[in-house]
Amino acid sequence: MHDMTVSWDDMRTVMCLVRAGSLSAAAQMLGLNYTTVARRVARAEGALGVALFERLTDGYRPTEAGLLVADHAARMADQTDALMRQLQGQDATLHGSLTITAPQLLIAHILTPVIDRFCAAYPDVDLHVRATNDLLDLNRREADLAIRISRDPGDTLKGLRLMPQYSASFASPKVAAQIKADPNGMVDWIVYADYTTVPKNVDPAYPHHRIRMTFDDMVAIRAAAQAGLGVARMPLFLGRASDGLVQVPVLPPQPYPEIWVVAHRDIWASAKVAAFREMLVPYMRGIRDQFVP
Amino acid sequence: MHDMTVSWDDMRTVMCLVRAGSLSAAAQMLGLNYTTVARRVARAEGALGVALFERLTDGYRPTEAGLLVADHAARMADQTDALMRQLQGQDATLHGSLTITAPQLLIAHILTPVIDRFCAAYPDVDLHVRATNDLLDLNRREADLAIRISRDPGDTLKGLRLMPQYSASFASPKVAAQIKADPNGMVDWIVYADYTTVPKNVDPAYPHHRIRMTFDDMVAIRAAAQAGLGVARMPLFLGRASDGLVQVPVLPPQPYPEIWVVAHRDIWASAKVAAFREMLVPYMRGIRDQFVP
DNA sequence: GTCATGTCATGCATTTTTGCATGCACGTGA
DNA sequence: TCACGTGCATGCAAAAATGCATGACATGAC
């Protein structure tokens, strides 16, 4: 023991255990049995001659040395991520796996035709779609290509602006009729997350506003608006595509974050990513009027 | 296959194979059977879905992808090296392994008393001495501490100047007597490696010189001088300490590269390295007159 | 041509690693 | 207090990785 030669995979295991906090969680990350994690960690400690964890009843807590190992292993993981990207970037084939991500509602209302067409055109590509509002880490290849609603394509990422976008106010036809009948009445708003104020730039013709409720999810906001609970601000494409909603003039169309397609520089030009982009970009150009007033 | 999850140890194996050029050489580097190397490489290729090597009759030649993997693995290796140094640097114990390196002749004629004393004072330290003129890579922990004859302590290394040093000309007593008897006679030189000229700054009282032979090793040069084959330039400490050699005035004492003790910054302050330094430095101060005129 | 030496591939036995099942310790909440 | 969940250690059997032995092939020396 104490020969200072550790298996690199054992270092990776130590890193996962530090991050996960318990043997079983780390094992799940690695797709291993937790017993194996425990044994690998013990082996690493033997090889280094240092205790890397304190064994507590509620889990493994890293020592200073354990944190040091995990830190260096994290940088090794960065190297493997970079390698995978570069290999993927060199990949000139149109088969194998391609993972894209986009916000839930953009996929549901806008992107399904492109996805459908892409699958038909490239049947050998194994397309994975991750519909989430979370910003997946393209550096770690959680996705190869992302369609994002954001002004910022990101630092190590390459991006292309697909579309300008506007938001406006929408409500159920009944609520819309009430507002039209009585502009001086109280307008009830359904707002996103922790916004505690009514949107700015509302039309002065409608002087009275209040926030009736908040949600942290746009699907829920839309459902509430559809149910007649109030007025919601949302992107034009979404309000227009939603049954049971009509645009109301309370909030005139406002600029909203643009739609971008982004990918890591390393894989931007790879065959599968390029093929998807070449289908996506003209399609989005063709439906521009769904996004602007 | 082709799931893009490679074992880190397999990446290390690929790196070694790229560097070694053949399965057996790589296996020796890793302390493995060459069959294992071949199987790990095959497994990595399967996982990445890319050929990493061309199998030729005279060895494995890396493809572009293979070089890419090796490159990233090399940076991972840098991380492990840094980790080992930092762990070692934190080590406050006075037992375990300590590796020092110094030029062969410096050890033989100067350092043995220090080494002896150190082993006596710290019997729990497992001292390894690497007597070589090669500059071992302290970044890769080929040694923990080095005593070097060089003006430059190195970039990421920390150094302390131990001693200024001078060289001079030495020869067997018989040759020395001949030169003294006939300063105008031909002085035969034994010079180092590919030096094709007689040392500069020779005393003008001895006008005729020629290079009789060259060696690439100082031990051999000294032996030749001792055998009466000619005059050799060497550090003062070496000529003075060698039986059968006397200083000759052909070349007056010249400044020679200084003696430094160097270690990587990360481990300079570690207990064992510090303990050795604290024994080495005063000892060298006390024998200064062996090195200067 | 023949031999020696280097390379790699492959089948088989051994060693090592891994997963599973069981048992134990320590909390939490009924 | 007692059941229950979570987290860990350990013994044993299955699975995987490894080493060894053999054979094929190319190259260069004689």
Image: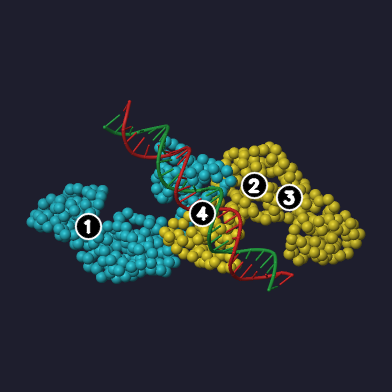
Chain colours: A cyan, B yellow, C green, D red
Q: Given the image, on which type of amino acid does mark 3 rest?
A: Leu
Q: Which residue is mark 4?
A: B9
Q: Which residue is mark 2?
A: B99
Q: Crowding at label 4, few (<14), some or many (≥20) Cα neighbours within 10 Å? A: some
Q: CA distance from mark 3 to mark 1?
A: 80 Å
Front position among marks 1 and 2: 2
At x 86%, y 65%, the residue is B186
Front position among marks 2 and 3: 2
Tag 3 subunit: B
- The relative height of residue C19 versus residue B192 in the rendered view (above or below) is above
Could you say where residue A34 lies in the image, as x and y percent from the top left? 43, 44
Q: Which callout, 2 or 3, points at the residue further toward the start of the chain?
A: 2
**Element at badge 2?**
strand
- The relative height of residue A272 versus residue A78 in the rendered view (above or below) is below
Q: Which residue is mark 3?
A: B106
Q: Which callout, 2 or 4, points at the residue further toward the start of the chain?
A: 4
Could you say where residue B80 lies in the image, as x and y percent from the top left? 53, 51
Q: CA distance from mark 1 to mark 2?
A: 68 Å
Q: CA distance from mark 4 to mark 3?
A: 39 Å
Q: Quadrant of the N terminus of chain B?
A: bottom left
Q: CA distance from mark 2 to mark 3?
A: 16 Å
Q: Given the image, on which type of amino acid does mark 2 rest?
A: Thr
Q: Crowding at label 1, few (<14), some or many (≥20) Cα neighbours within 10 Å? A: many
Q: CA distance from mark 2 to mark 4?
A: 26 Å
